[in-house]
Amino acid sequence: GSKMEKIPFDVVSIDIGSTTRDFSSIPGASRYAISTRPISDLVRRIEKEEEELKGKHTDGTTPNGARVVVVGGGAAGIELSLALRARWNDLLDSKLSIKLIDSNNMLFPSETPACRSALQRVMEKYSIEVLHNLEVDEVTSSHVHVSSNDDDDDSAVNNADSDDTKTKIPYTHCIWATGAEAHTLAWDMHEQFGLAVSPDRGWIRVNRHLQSVSHPSVFAAGDCCEIVNGDRRSPPKAGVYAVRSGPILIENLTRFLDVGSHCTTMDDAADERGLVAYSPQDDFLKLLMCGDGTALGFRFGIPLYGKWVWELKDHIDQMFMDLFDVKNFPTYDSKTNKNEVSNGEEGDDKDFDTAQYDQYESKKERMKAEDACQLLLRTDDDVDFQRAWNVLREMMGDEEYKEDVLSIFHRSTIHTQ
């Protein structure tokens, strides 16, 4: 193997993300399936398969089209199912079967019935067949072998193909989108250096300052860590939490270095350096693109759907990507010990802003609750996504306003049932 190199550090931040759950442990998965992680490999594999499909369709060697099986009923699996329907349906003259394997008895079980019903309508609209209560046992070159985890109902595998047990699902393309699993690197650091990790999953354990509970000079953020903060649960493995923790992480790394490394206990280190606590939000705006210029969203238990939801998703993503534009990068002035970022005009620098990239200031005049509810429920193409987004952010910042909008939504839901 390659020679190991030692790199000295005063403080280190471990932000290694995660790998795809069970991809290495389920027989045949890593050999035959396409994993969602890393994303660069996913994109490359999908584009390669698409080019092959184009060639086969042109010369007539794919008369039966394609059969896609997506393993994983979370946001990634749902979006990929919808994306492949959009990309490959016309290519194959609609000869495209897409099945989604879900280990739960419903998609998004933590969401409200209204949101789940909206999702079900979308999946039916785009002919995504969802198979619930299934666990994958093995992947071969032509079939995904599954078994039911529901002892009371074996109907989930009735549409599978097998001579007797009906636990084989045929496929031409298998996508593995099963959620997050810790990298082996975290386990290696635990075994070699005693870095604290969760004993069952291998997530790096950090306090509310994103600082390792075992090594004060080690920090971690994003998917790879588990936040230990009393009885409060660590947030789920979703990109929004990694993004939100970024400004807190850079602030605490800077403060740690400013004070030095002479503190010997975690409490002393946090108190003396004035480390900033990360307080993850309880819920977040979930946005699922449908592949046809529309998207489905969930917030505060309200389903959001239409072109405007896609425009909102695209806008938020673009705002985040703009952070990586070179002209927006901060520069460090060693004389003033400050980070500075230019707005593009020579000689006009300002202190580097560590606030959230989508920080919002409440409006003096906000939309009436009834009008706000009606706006969020609209699905036509004339909705201004900025106005709808402002409503959602006003609801996030004002509990009373949120409850007013939700009460109107619940009343309208009852009346339409």
Image (tube, rainbow, N blue to C red):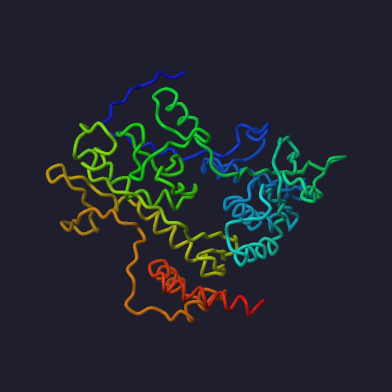
- Residue at 58% across / 39% down in the picture? 21
The answer to whether 52 is drawn above or below residue 416 in the figure is: above
Number of numbered discs present? 0
Q: Position of residue 294 (x, y in %)?
A: 57, 66
- Residue at 45% across / 33% down in the picture? 197
Q: Residue furthest left?
A: 335
The answer to whether 192 is drawn above or below residue 29 in the figure is: above
Q: Position of residue 245 (x, y in %)?
A: 37, 49
The quarter of the picture where the C terminus appears is bottom right
* For residue 149, side relative to residue 7 (left or right): right
Q: Position of residue 122 (x, y in %)?
A: 65, 64
Q: Nearer the viewer, residue 84 or 127?
A: 127
Q: Residue furthest right?
A: 163
* For residue 261, side relative to residue 19 (left or right): left
Q: Nearer the viewer, residue 41 or 393?
A: 393
Q: Position of residue 243 (x, y in %)?
A: 40, 51
Picture quadrant where residue 391 is located = bottom left
- Residue at 39% across / 45% down in the picture? 229
* For residue 337, side relative to residue 301 (left or right): left
